Image (spheres, coloured by chain):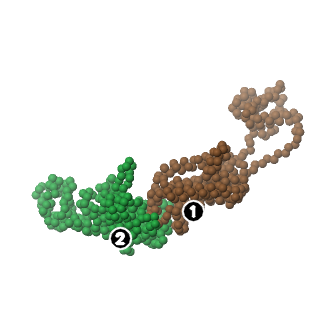
Amino acid sequence: MQWSVIWAVSRATLRDFWRTPEAVFWSYAFPLAMALVLGFAFREQARAPIPVAVVAADASYASALAALRSDPRLGVKEMDVVAAERALTLGAVALVVHLSSSALRLELDQTRPESELAELLVRQRLQEANGRRDALTIATTNVTRPGARYIDFLIPGLVGLNLLGMGMFGVGFNLVYMRVRRTLRRLAVTPMGRAEFFAGFMVTRLVLSLPASLVVVWFGQIVFGVPVHGSWLALVLLMIVGGICFSGIGALLGSRAKTIEGASGIMNAVQMPMWLIGGVFFSNQRFPGALQTVVDAVPMSLVTDGMRSVMLEGKGCGGVMLPVVALLATGLVCLAVALRIFRWN
Amino acid sequence: MHAIEIDELRKVFRGRRGASVIAVDGLSLRVARGQVFGLLGPNGAGKTTTVEICEGLQTQTSGRVRVLGDEWTHATSQQIRQRIGVSLQDTRFIETQTVRETLTLFRAFFNRGQSVDDAIAAVSLQEKANARVDKLSGGQQQRLAVACALVGDPELLFLDEPTTGLDPQSRRNLWEVVRAFRARGGTVLITTHYMEEAEQICDTVGIVDRGKLIAEGTPRALVRSLGGEHVIEVTGQGLAAQGEQLAAGLPGVTQTRLEGERMTMQVAAPHQVMPLLIKRLDDRGIELTELTTRHTSLEDVFVALTGRHLRDGEAA
């Protein structure tokens, strides 16, 4: 193994990356765009008032109506009986309040949480308007704490997704592409060894994927205030071994495939479960017993769960040693196998 | 010592359903150091398979190959590769790199070699040094491929159909590169199906057909082996009916071949044959439609040996 050869291969593949605008877009711009779109789509909003229909028989109930309107959490609309019934059926209102001289009556579907909440609010307002006083004074403080929001969950998922994509396309696909174009054949008749060739690819991936991952985390911090409670070193460590692991898997999948089509099939088959059960977009923590163990051991889960434990639970390097070692070992085993079965032709 | 020694080389490709194709069928040859050796033959003759076995890119079914004194083994491969330069058929380099970057990469693989600038100059690509590979013409890409083969300053150069599809200017340019390499003491094994190319640059030519070496020698010796150094070709109505006896007794005619209405004769002195031939044709009432004379070429040698033309296989 000669460092000068590894470095030469790495420089060539790095240049290849920077001169391929698509590669730069999917690795650097796309994750940020995704964070932006999903972050805003699932942001915590101030709750909209609950729509409530009031059917008032005459004007004598104006004070009751005013009491209901005083609560910003209720969106009060006056309707006639027919319109109110219809609105309730369609779910356009959560509750119908019948105000008549003979009786006060609430009409709702109690299985709907929104309707139940509306019922509590309406009862309280009407009782207070007629003189009920609270027996206790209870203070309430409203908090929205970063860490529990969807974007906080999503950012580590996007980092994992990006590392996976870069391993699959940057290493696996590139190898197959170079094989199809017979570039690999030409390299095979030079004194360069496969180990040097692979090492060059790995250096490139490390150089490219660490900044690409950090950019996503920083973007989350700046735009959405996503916290990093734990150690940055632990985070960087996870990113590096995650990159090695996925590059190793990519190298393995690309080590023999003779056609782009064949390679795409295998890569999709490997990527799909990682997306689904790797905790990228939604939680992967609700599987039954033994299955959960499997799910937790998927490389993508190791990356995303590990990053979440650092960013959200404040863990340090010691806390992520298990996933770091597991990812590194998986990556190195894949690389070793890829190196053995690799085909230039 | 020889740069390349090939003994009883066989390569059989196992196809689907048990069908197998014999690409190389007991081929033996020697390439002396300092020589430009040309493998000439139609497409599918086994030239590329033979060369790729020599390059260590394919392994033989049986037989022995020594390159610069060594057989290809795990232990020797690295060392052999440091000493050879290769230009494969149809190589595409990484398209996003420039000519200079591509050569810098290849130079890094070798322990010794020429400077990248010298390699660029050797194939006259100075003007394109900073152009990306995907912006080069076919001829320029081929020149880059040869430069990549030269950049490690090899003792032995393999060129597999380096001029196929090139314009005459680029072709002559490459011949100059080969001559310059030989002048520095290098050995070259080149394959081609252009006989003119073989005549121009090869010290020795091996004619390959159906996986076998059917003739070997200097281009001149091969041509002389046909007896005459000139060829007369006549085409005329009714020639087919007359047959080869038409040429019988003409002075210095060593070989005659009839293909339809065209007769090809191998002659020593065309000026002696021509008047007699025309008189004979006249006497028998054959109307001449074409009459040409030229020097005997390697193509004639190939046709004489196989009864087929070099380019016959091209469509297949």
Residue A318 screen position, x and y as percent: 70, 58
Q: Residue at x 32, y 55 (%)?
A: B314
Image location of residue B49, percent across then percent down: 37, 59
Q: Which mark is residue A203?
A: 1
Q: Which chain is green?
A: B
Instruction: Please give the chain letter of the residue carrying mark 1.
Output: A
Chain letter matching colour brown = A
Marks 2 & 1 on one chain:
no
Give residue B255's quadrant in the image: bottom left
Q: Decide if residue A205 is on the left or right side of residue B144.
A: right
Q: Is residue B304 visible?
A: yes
Which of the two discs, 2 and 1, sits closer to the camera?
Answer: 2
Q: CA distance from mark 2 to mark 1?
A: 42 Å
Farthest residue in the bottom direction?
A: B184
In this orientation, does residue A172 appear?
no
Residue under pointer 2: B2
